[in-house]
Image: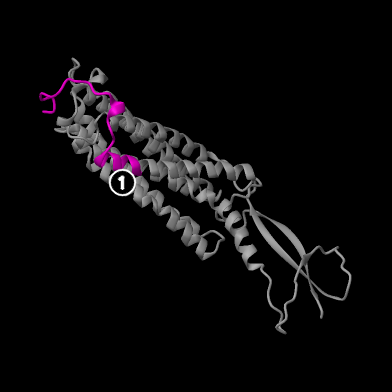
Amino acid sequence: MYLSARSLTNTDINDVPITGTAALILGISLAMATIAVVAIGLRLYAARTGSAMLRWDFYFVVVGTLLGVATEALFAMAVKNGIGKHIQEVSFDELWQALKWSWIGIFTGLTGTFVAKLGIVAMLYQVATPTQKRRKAVLITIGGINVLAGIVQLALSLTQCSPYQKLWYMLTPGTCDRTSVASTFGYVQGTIAVLADFALAVYPVTIVWNLQASLRTKVGFCALMAGGIICAAAAIMRTYYITKLRHPTDPTWDLVPFLAWASTELWFVIIIGSIPPLRPLFIRWFGNTKSLLSGSATRSRTGKNSTIPLRSVNGTNAGTMMTTKNEITSRIMTNPDGSEENILPRKGNGEQIMVSKAYTIETMER
């Protein structure tokens, strides 16, 4: 029993260094959180510059990110108070504080995870064509069941002890007679989360092959969304470590694997839900770079250097010139609502806007 005798002396947590396994896990988690926040910032920038639009999937991911940041702060407080150490190394006060912040962080993180997962559902929903009603119904079902399971898990976990404070402060008068129910349903919720992650990872394959896009684009999109398998793996590990929460003998140490995998699942859901909508911005950036590199000057066939300036069609220049006019035409596929943030263009469902740019390549004859 982890309530065996130990120090009652309170320690100033500002003087306690974060080291060892807890420090490593917290550092990795913060790194993933940073990537997620940067991705959110890039999506806002893309919307501001007109490279993308903010849709429902963005708002779900933002809410999930805010809850994730709050979870990181709570986990940091838990680690500062003793999570990651063996129970013999912490005082009673540190133990209660560590468990308190850990449990609140678990509740916040679980909420953030199923909300962020709705962002992936919403993104795939928008990619589906208006005629694919059954596919959209499947997505709504996946998202709805996942959210429902998460809410039930939250309710059972919060009410497993009466009063709820007894969940982390075991000396509080009361009972925890519903712990077995909460932990058992934890396996159900974990299984649903795993199946949802696998379904959302495989689902894009069933729709992209019917869309008007290059094979490279289709394969890339499917490979990116297949990253959801990592979320499924994290959910499997998180579910496995529920056993440690049922009857912990060393709670400040036993909680570490569960918290680590829960955090990994949360942040990978957010990251994977943020990268595909950034494709138009990346194409805008790196596509321009590629164009600039490919537009460098070339040597003339005679071996002499020649200048090939790009001039306006209406421009004039003194001297003898050989002028060749080349028109470059590009197509932008748009949605019926006028949006240009079409990750994968559809067959026959979008308008074509012809954007023509004319350039004159002039070479001075020697």
Coloration of the structure image: one colour
Where's residue 176, x and y in %?
19, 23
Looking at the image, residue 365 lies above or below residue 244: below
- Residue, x 20% and y 16% (percent of image)? 172
The residue closer to the viewer here, 37 or 185, is 37
Magenta span contains residue 5: yes
Q: Amino acid at mark 1?
A: Ala
Can residue 216 be seen at all in this image of the molecule? yes
Magenta span contains residue 141: no
**Residue at the far right in the pictured view:** 318
Query: What residue did someone put label 1 on?
Result: 234
Where's residue 270, x and y in %?
43, 43
Q: Quadrant of the N terminus?
A: top left
Where's residue 322, x and y in %?
83, 76
- Residue, x 67% and y 67% (percent of image)? 295
Residue 313 occupies which quadrant of the picture? bottom right
Residue 287 occupies which quadrant of the picture? bottom right
Q: Which residues are magenta?
A: 1-28
